[in-house]
Amino acid sequence: MSLFCAQGSAGRAISAEELRNLFLSSLEKLGKPKSVLAVPPDHTRSASRAGELTRHAWNYYGENLKQILLAVGTHRAMTPEQLTAMFGDVPHSLFHAHKWREDVETLGTIPKEFIREQSEGKVEYDWPAQVNRLVSRGHFDLILSIGQVVPHEVIGMANYNKNILIGTGGPESINRSHYLGAVYGMERIMGRADNPVRRVLNRAAREFLAGLPIVYVLTVVAQDSTGDTVVRGLFIGDDHECFHRASDLSLKVNFDLLPKPISKAVVYLDPHEFHSTWLGNKAVYRTRMALADGAELVILAPGVREFGEDPQIDQLIRKYGYHGTPATLEMVRKNADLAANLSAAAHLIHGSSEGRFNITWCPGKLTRKEVEGAGFSYGDLEKMQQLYNPAKLKQGWNTVSSEEIFFIENPGLGLWSTPDRF
């Protein structure tokens, strides 16, 4: 077990050149593999710097970098334009879009007794460790799993073995892990590196991934005082130590503990990154522990055009809507289509306010009927952006027409709470 790089602190800003040098010096420690697979995320995690790190790996290894497997999970495949925007001049022929219903095999199973124990008796099913066949059967000398550690609603802190076991996972592994986290309780998980979902993945990694040459490349990225994103840390290793070091730093720079609850929050979703409520509900996940009872959450979403990244999930969200945990659990019990797609059910729980605060979606490309049909309030985007102009608001507290609001420029980079809820 090795830690090849552990650089970072809350006050550090790692430049692009320093990031490249730290990364390449770590690659030098790995020898000269003749067959390399890179596994970065897609454009919805572009802030991770995985695009430029993958490009550096391609430049370093040349023809020995055989393929790039995008750990998209259930997301749509990237377009050629998105690939170029994120990865630069890396040849598109190297990219393989993970097809989560087709490209996977099951390496083994975590027994239902362990799942029951971790969920405190809330669910009981086996959990299959599923990965893309390129990972398990590609016979690579090195697999570079590249991504960002940041607070996450399903697994507490994103990345590490999640990038492999969920990002390149299959229907059952994705569905059941998401549902486990949702039923256990999102607010008990977010911001915590140790939690039931992570323990399941850690056990699966020990039992089923141990023979694979995986090295994890983990960034920690945050916004500085001007609103620009900066790399605070880079951690590279082949075991849990690099993840825990990255998680410790992420909690320092990506987590804001507020002195008082938020009565009105306004969250902006970059149209280049957020096209669905499946992704955009980060605005709900990441703010919910900071929102007061009866608060208003306004989501400005000019690029949002659908509910699910996956067509089947999109239809399920439209059919059942966001109505809270008890209602969703009951719908799972009564409806076979939702019970067969537990990640959709988990998302319906994650995206609900549980009746505690109001969520107003202001999408660019969904109608009032669609938004209200899914259980949200609807706001006119043009009017809301005139009132709450993202270009004029600063991250954090603002006063708009004598009204105090809390503005968040990118919910994917943080987690907000008050002390009583964390």
Image (cartoon, helix red, strand yellow):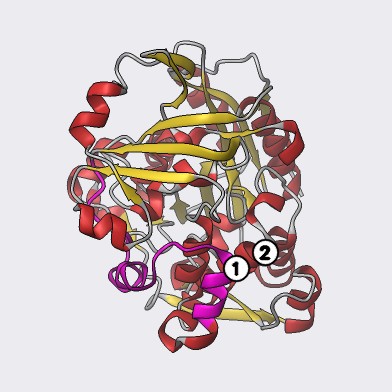
Above or below 180: residue 218: above
Q: Which mark is residue 177?
A: 1
| x then y, percent, for residue 199 | 74, 62
Q: CA distance from mark 2 to mark 1?
A: 9 Å
| x then y, percent, for residue 81 | 18, 43
Q: Quadrant of residue 314?
A: bottom left
Please give the range of residues in magenta: 303-332
Q: Residue at x 37, y 65 (%)?
A: 98
Q: Check disc 2 and report its element: helix, strand or loop.
A: helix
Frontmost residue, 44 versus 417: 417
Amino acid residing under circle 1:
Ser
Q: Which mark is residue 201?
A: 2
Frontmost residue, 348 versus 130: 348
Above or below 21: residue 243: below
Q: Residues within 10 Å of mark 1 (few under 14, many from 20)?
A: many
Asked whether, in this view, residue 297 is left or right of residue 11, the answer is left
Question: The C terminus is located in which quarter?
Answer: top right
Q: Is residue 84 magenta?
A: no
